[in-house]
Amino acid sequence: MVKKTSTSTYKPGESIANIQKKYNLKNVIKLASNENPSGPSKKAILLANQTIKDINRYPDSKSFDLKNNLQKYLSKTNIKTDNIIIGNGSNEILELISRVYLDTKSEVIFSKHSFLVYKIISNNMKAKIIESMPITKKGLGYMGVDLNVMRSKVTLKTKVVFIANPNNPTGTILTYKELESFVKSMPKRIIIVIDEAYCEYAIHKGYKSAINLIKKFSNVIITRSFSKIFALAGVRVGYGLASASIIGRLNDMRQPFNVNYVAQSMAAVSLKDTSFVRKSLLDNDKGMDFLKKEFDKLRISYLESYTNFITINLGNKANLIYKKLLINGIILRPLDNYEMKNYLRVTVGTPKENAYFITKLKSIMGLKHNV
């Protein structure tokens, strides 16, 4: 029997409603779950209002329209519709991967400070978890995924490797060349999963997606989400990209009607709303720059991020500051579950939310309130 690691339950960020009730607050801002503060595309909302009248009907089990729109969205690649699987969030795709490729005799590798769902789904399959240590030297990739360490952990029992790029909760990035070299060095029997939930933010900053690795290597799976830049976290929709053979195996495990009708429609139209995406990226840039400058003034260190969140180091006061911020109606994300107890993760919010957060943070730290 394989012993489970200590963390087997995902703990989402506190909800606005719970904090309002707990502290008797009228206004609460949530900077905990890396949601797009702009809300969904107006075109997506309009379509949702139009399609909701048809929810007495089952959705398209194969998400045909959404796949076609994704193929067009990815037109600069060789991705075809049979290279795409649609999921109830990218989490479902990750779970399907674990169910197809992991069992009690398997080993699975991922970085110690990476998306907690990898650990949960591996535990569910009773696979042996091998956690590689992150880069510990100060620099651009500090606290990020160390592919050399990860490679050294491979054994004959290794079945799946999970790599988040950009990484959550550190926000760090790996280059295309680094990933290509890593995949090339790995045995072809091992499935390499590259989780690109935050890829739009990284691409905007000049980094290249790993999507072209799919045509070069038959053992690569890319997962992506509509919950981040496309702001559809509430309807749960994501997708996976891989060889037709792998997609076929994942579909064999997938439940029919796994993605609801409204979610499919909103995702499809969101892909076409390039102006919304562009504005969201620019707004995120401005918010990130503001927060970094304020953290620099406060001498608060942070991890270099290529996402819509920034992870800050508050030392042994992190938990105390987190609780005091809650009392003031500000929800951040503690990282105890990721064994990063001195850190808090901050989602880039609206200008007003960012300014209010900094004001309250300064007050808690006994500094001037002006921003």
Image (spheres, rainbow, N blue to C red):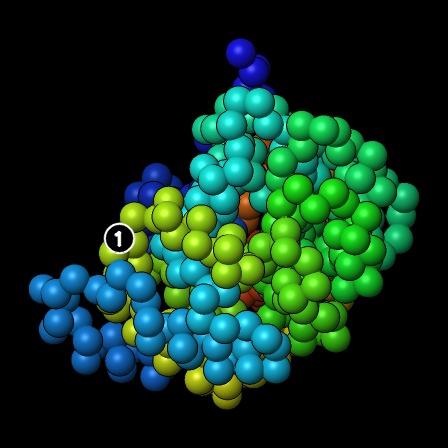
Residue at 61% over, 24% down? 128
Can you tell which quarter of the image residue 279 is in? bottom right
Q: Quadrant of the C terminus?
A: bottom right
Query: What residue sits 76% from the left and 33% below the top?
Result: 154
Q: Which residue lies furthest to the front in this view?
A: 245
36, above or below 124, in the image? below
Q: Which residue lies furthest to the bottom in this view?
A: 275
Q: In this view, does 173 lie to the left or right of 364?
A: right
Where residue 282 appears, as percent x and y from the top left, is 61, 80
Judging from the image, what secondary structure is the residue with disc 1 in?
loop
Work out whether 197 lies above or below 131.
below
Which image quarter: residue 28? bottom left
Residue 132 x %, y %: 75, 34
Q: Is residue 53 visible?
A: yes
Check disc 1: other Cα within 10 Å, few if <14, some if 14-19, many if 20+. few
The residue depicted at 34 percent of the width and 43 percent of the height is 18
Q: What residue type is labelled 1?
A: Pro
Q: What is the x, y in percent for residue 20? A: 34, 48
Badge 1 is on which residue? 256
Residue at the spot 76% in from the left edge and 56% down from the top edge: 179
In the image, taking residue 256 as reference, residue 71 lies left or right, namely right
Looking at the image, residue 354 lies above or below residue 132: below
**For residue 342, side relative to residue 149 (left or right):** left
The location of residue 119, given as percent across then percent down, is 56, 33
Quick check: 314 left or right of 214?
A: right
The front one of 67 and 138 is: 67
